[in-house]
Image: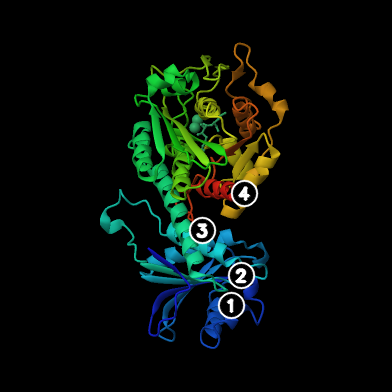
Amino acid sequence: MNLTANPAALPGRVIDLLGLIAFEDDLAGKDSPLFASFDPVLGPLLRQVFADERFKASFGQTVILHTQGSLAVRRVAVVGAGSRPDFRPALARHQAATLARIANQVGARSLHILQPSTEVDPQPIRWLEAAAEGAILGAYRFDKYLASEKRTPQTIETASFQTVSPVPPDVAAAAIDRARRVASAIAHARDLVNEPAATLTPTALAADSVARAAATGVVATVLGPADCRERGMGLFLAVAQGSSQEPRFIHLAWRPANAKKRIVLVGKGVTFDSGGLSLKTNEGMLGMKADMAGAAAVLSAIGVAAEELLPIEVHALAACTENMPSGTAYKLGDVLRSMSGKTVEINNTDAEGRLTLADALTYGLGLGPDIVLDFATLTGACVVALGPHTAGVMSNDDAVAANWMAATHDSGEDMWPLPLPSRLMDQLKSDVADLRNTGERWGGALTAGLFLKQFVGAIPWIHVDLAGPSTTDKEWGCYGKGATGFGVASIVQYLRGLAAS
Ligand code: BES
Ligand code: MN
Ligand code: ZN
């Protein structure tokens, strides 16, 4: 897809689809900027269609109209953006994605999106970046297993964006390049998560990471079971021992000479979570090929840091394994020794993520990081707490957490802080080991976070539980059905922020 900002109006150039973004209050005010900009032709037409179609500009609502040759555009699509005061540039990803999806549905080759006017600072560059990212993401699909006649054709060739105020062309081009890099990383994370566990084994995930690293200056190291044994990764290997697929510990590193900070990213990489001997129900197991979404996010995001030559040393770690029941599977009551030396009694083999992460965190501390961040589809309890679209954020450092939350706000990914109440540590006490792997039912997201906290020592650390938002069963904004690539946008935003500060 060709992306351009503020293209010069060409006489006789016909746009297949003009994309407009409307706020609720556009429909109330007589002199709304939305209509004013199009009078005399389109303004009254829009008013009429909005009334006929009961269009209220609520978030994500759409209406499409044909111009019947009355304008130099074939169709106009309007997408609602809800309340104007709630708008921020990052949300343009959702509107642009919706418009891109419509463009493909109606077979448009060119899409031109106008930035809506806002009372607050319109931040045209940030709007442009978010909208460009959204247009690419809206065109994303995972259709490799569909017969070609069942694939929706990708018709958009050009997406152009009109900002409310002029921006220097080189600045606009840089924003579009940034958008393209993030969107490709997100698309790659989605591909990995959407891929069935039968093909996306730990070995396959490692091979993909190695292949991609070579292209960007990222150094890839892959540890097999023997290396992991040598390093004492007893928790990770216990989870892996029930599977006939070999585990792989993936370590990607971006080490620029001018690094200002060293950041370790850890992603949960359970390529299929059956629950192990604490077997899940069919219902509970259905989406579990996505239990490596954290790994997909960190392994994809680090590539952007390298492509942008960010002056930040970044490591992406993923302890990848299946969690399977078998004659060799780890058992309830087993006492395992972690790489850190701490012992863990197993009272539920379905709480495997924290075990794989604990050893990955210990490996990460060995790299001498300034900050460690982990991303994991860790608990159903987090989905109960925050709903399916919001990730939970836990941390041992308020200032680092505040920076992280600011990055998520700017990237447009929904995250919300959760506490780590030390009182709940009682639930993780064992009579025979330093810890047991699960607590009681209530506060399950927090005891999982507290378990991880035991493995990070005093290093500033952020834990993101993305069990809910890693996939979606309903298309919404820039998210199509299936994997969302959640986490990538915030990681990149955060790293860019560190690079700029
Ligand atoms: N991978 C699951 C968590 C999960 C649940 C991710 C739903 C996405 C959607 C994790 O390994 C798990 O099974 N967690 C258990 C923990 C429990 C045994 C303490 C859970 O949430 O039930
Ligand atoms: Mn599990
Ligand atoms: Zn799991």
* Among the 4 quarters of the image, the one containing residue 222: top left
Residues at marks 1 and 3 touching, judged by CB atoms closer than 8 Å: no
- For the residue pair 305 and 90, the one nearer the viewer reads as 305
Residues at marks 1 and 2 touching, judged by CB atoms closer than 8 Å: yes
Q: Is residue 412 visible?
A: no
Report the label total.
Answer: 4
From mark 1 to mark 4, how far is it between C-alphas? 37 Å
* Label 1 SS: helix
* Residue on which the image places disc 2: 23
Residue 6: x and y in percent read 48, 73
Queried on whether the Cβ of the residue with tag 1 lies below 8 angstroms from ligand 1, the answer reads no
* Residue on which the image places disc 3: 477
Q: Residue furthest left?
A: 148
Residue in the picture at 51% in, 25% down: 359
What amino acid type is highlighted by mark number 3? Gly
Q: Residue furthest right?
A: 423
Residue 229 is marked as none
Residue 86: x and y in percent read 66, 62
What amino acid type is highlighted by mark number 4? Ser
- For the residue pair 428 and 284, the one nearer the viewer reads as 428
* Residue on which the image places disc 4: 501
What amino acid type is highlighted by mark number 2? Phe
Residue 34 is marked as 1
Frontmost of labels 3 and 4 is: 4
From mark 1 to mark 2, how far is it between C-alphas? 9 Å
With respect to residue 335, does 407 lie above or below?
Answer: below
Residue in the picture at 61% in, 70% down: 23
What amino acid type is highlighted by mark number 1? Leu
